[in-house]
């Protein structure tokens, strides 16, 4: 075998890497499957997702664009025993009229009891240039709802496994081609 010959495994690995890089370059972040609200400078809006709802304002400032408001779990859609959040992250997505994500900002929250006042949201969105159809905004979130103290009887979401009370909720933008 000559020194310049490349083994079939190395060739296959290189080919797979090139294909993966090519596919990644074609992928884009989309929020078209989420509810989009038109950007309204200073206007108060509400958005209801599956497990969270948001009351917010969209603002233009000297720093760029900003989303401020509050997020609350939708109690009717989560288990009755859920009183704590762990690993909560809330994202704001700035989108075009097709749901293509132009900018995103995420805030992570510490493990805590679900506050009656909700979770404050203050997320900057930096993007240059106005899309022809205008800006739209939506939210994504990911969290585990847990029980600070497991209920005495099994309940919705418990899976019948005593002591394991975790309800995972997640809605986020997704990679598409």
Image: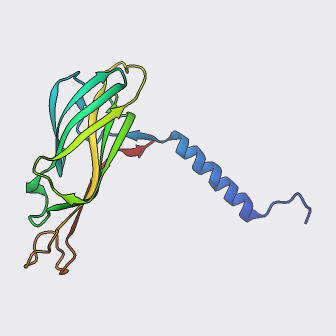
Measuring from the top left, give residue 114's x and y in whole percent: 15, 56
Residue occupying the point 16% across, 68% down: 147
Residue 97 seen in render: no
Q: Is residue 104 above or below residue 16?
A: above
Which part of the image, by quadrant, shows the N terminus? bottom right
Which part of the image, by quadrant, shows the C terminus? top left
Q: Quadrant of residue 139?
A: top left
Measuring from the top left, give residue 90's x and y in whole percent: 29, 46
Q: Is residue 127 above or below residue 74?
A: above
Residue occupying the point 28% across, 29% down: 136
> Residue 137 or 6: which is nearer the viewer?
137
Instruction: Specify whether 24 is left or right of 35.
Output: right
Measuring from the top left, give residue 66's x and y in whole percent: 30, 30
Residue occupying the point 37% across, 37% down: 104
Residue 133 seen in render: yes
Q: Quadrant of residue 169?
A: bottom left
Q: How is the image coloured?
A: rainbow
Measuring from the top left, give residue 127's x and y in whole percent: 41, 27
Instruction: Specify whether 32 is left or right of 147.
Output: right
Toward the right, the furthest residue is: 2
Q: Quadrant of residue 64?
A: top left
Residue occupying the point 42% across, 43% down: 176
Q: Is residue 97 above or below residue 105?
A: above
Q: Total label count?
A: 0
> Residue 68 or 78: which is nearer the viewer?
68
> Residue 28 or 116: which is nearer the viewer?
116
């Amino acid at each position: 075998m000559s020194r310049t010959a490349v083994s079939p495994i190395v060739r296959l690995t290189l080919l797979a890497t090139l294909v993966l890089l090519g596919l990644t370059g074609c992928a884009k972040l989309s929020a078209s499957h989420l509810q989009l609200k038109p950007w309204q400078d200073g206007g108060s809006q509400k958005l209801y997702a599956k497990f969270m709802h948001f009351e917010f304002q969209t603002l233009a400032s000297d720093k760029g664009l900003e989303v401020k408001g509050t997020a609350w779990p939708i109690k009717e859609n989560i288990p009755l025993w859920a009183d704590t959040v762990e690993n909560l992250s809330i994202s704001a997505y700035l989108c075009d009229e097709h749901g293509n994500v132009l900018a995103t900002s995420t805030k992570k929250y510490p493990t805590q009891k679900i506050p009656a006042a909700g979770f404050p949201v203050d997320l900057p969105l930096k993007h240059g240039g106005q899309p022809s159809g205008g800006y739209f905004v939506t939210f994504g979130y990911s969290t585990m709802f847990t029980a600070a103290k497991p209920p005495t009887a099994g309940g919705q979401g418990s899976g019948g496994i005593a002591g394991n009370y975790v309800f995972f909720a997640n809605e986020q933008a997704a990679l598409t081609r």
